Image (cartoon, rainbow, N blue to C red):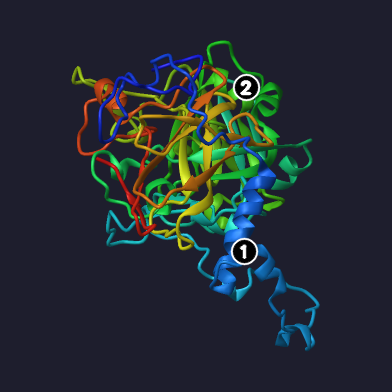
Amino acid sequence: MAKTDNMAKEDKSIGSGWHFSPDAIHKPAEVDTAAPPSAGRRSFLRKGAAMAGVALAGAGGGASVAQAAKLTVPEWSRTMGKPIPPTDYGMPIEYESHYVRTRSDVFVNRQNYSDWSMSPLQKQQGIVTPNGVFFERHHNGTAKIDPEQHRLVIHGLVKRPLVFTMSDLMRYPSVSKFHFMECSGNTLTDWREPRSTTVQQSHGLLSCAQWTGVPLAWLLDEAGVDPKGKWVMLEGADGSGHLRSIPMEKIMDDVLIAFGQNGEMLRAEQGYPIRAFVPGWEGNTSVKWLRRIKVVEGPAHVRGETARYTDPMPDGKWRQFSMEMECKSVITSPSGGMTLRGGPGFYEIQGFAWSGNGKITHVDVTLDGGRNWREATLEEPVMDKCLTRFRYRWNWDGGPARIASRAKDSTGYVQPTVEDLAREREIVGFVQHHNGIYPWAVSQQGEVTNAIG
């Protein structure tokens, strides 16, 4: 795929309209510094505050008018608060009841056992996705497993087959790592047509968490792997018996047997009491409700890696085991379904970038459909195989705009255009692993819509 040493380039060779040409990231030119991300945070805040003052006062008085407005004492400042319960599990306040997962509004599913539930990325604050809205993908509904009865078996090409109870596993030393998880079908609904109306529907099969568990390499070391064992089969305990084959190199590198997520035990829908977690790889490899680990000589070629989770190629063949999630980004604010209600002026463009092959090193933002690209600011922490938040300070002039982002990771890989992907893969209605640049259109009224196609 395309690589470049300097992403923040201006491509002067392209004409009008959308400009995500396959060659755009190769053209050497000067960085467009018309509105650099480092241009005076104080100035940005000062001008933004002045505009807020105008909006509050309904006149041109600026921030001083806002500061002079009378601040009333509301009812909640004059009454007792809610009593503290003796025990409870905290829930969001009712004013945030809109922060929920949703099913796909593109593919209407008439049953409730094999489907997606998508994370509201447009409302996520920071890089960690709360457990209650972490995306879901089910093949046979949510299994309810008694941890006292659950067993994990390691067998196959090992010297000592092992059986673990949950108590056994919880006695091992554990590690905690921040990583994203993404379904390989994320964004597939919008390959050539603008079918999704929000970023939740287009990119909501993406979430990020702190995962806690035992490195699988430690358990395999205890079992003693036969040198012939080059792959590992992971099998789930739910009714679908979901199974995936993973190369031994990846298993021994960073795969976890996870029991914790964001400081608590896994939720049922995330594989309670234990799941595999395979950092940077498509979500279906992180088998939930894990019950069996079998060391084998080669992949099993089961349904989940032959009829499903494969990619059609131009030569008529299908690509198997394309499990790494490549570098990708998307603007989450402003994004589809939102409106810039304050009129022309200062706004902050925000979004996420991620790569299954390393760290994000660079994100550029375009305001004009790809003619020019401007460097965005990466917000710390920037971690391996983890969501990275980017920001760009935008002075919107009130005219139509075409915004998008493109990311670069620590391997030098640059997020491709849809045209790049189309040349590499034969398209049969949709494409798995769609990591192409994704645009939004902003109208003169400030309304933001999907601009694919």
| 30 sits to left or right of 311 | right
Asked whether residue 252 appears in the rendered view, the answer is: yes
Picture quadrant of residue 220:
top right
Residue identifier under label 2: 253
Question: Type of residue at label 2?
Answer: Asp
Q: On screen, 420 above or below 242? A: above
Q: On screen, 349 above or below 85? A: above
Q: How many marks?
A: 2
Q: On screen, 413 above or below 397? A: above
| 48 sits to left or right of 296 | right
Give the label on residue 147, or none.
none
Give the label on residue 62, or none.
1
Question: What residue sits 66% from the left and 63% below the top?
Answer: 63
Question: Type of residue at label 1?
Answer: Gly
Q: Nearer the viewer, residue 255 or 118?
A: 118
Question: What residue sits 78% from the left and 83% below the top?
Answer: 83
| Residue 300 drawn at (x, y percent) | 40, 26
Q: On screen, 233 above or below 210? A: above
Classify 10 Å Cα crowding around label 2: few (below 14), some (14-19), many (20 and above). few
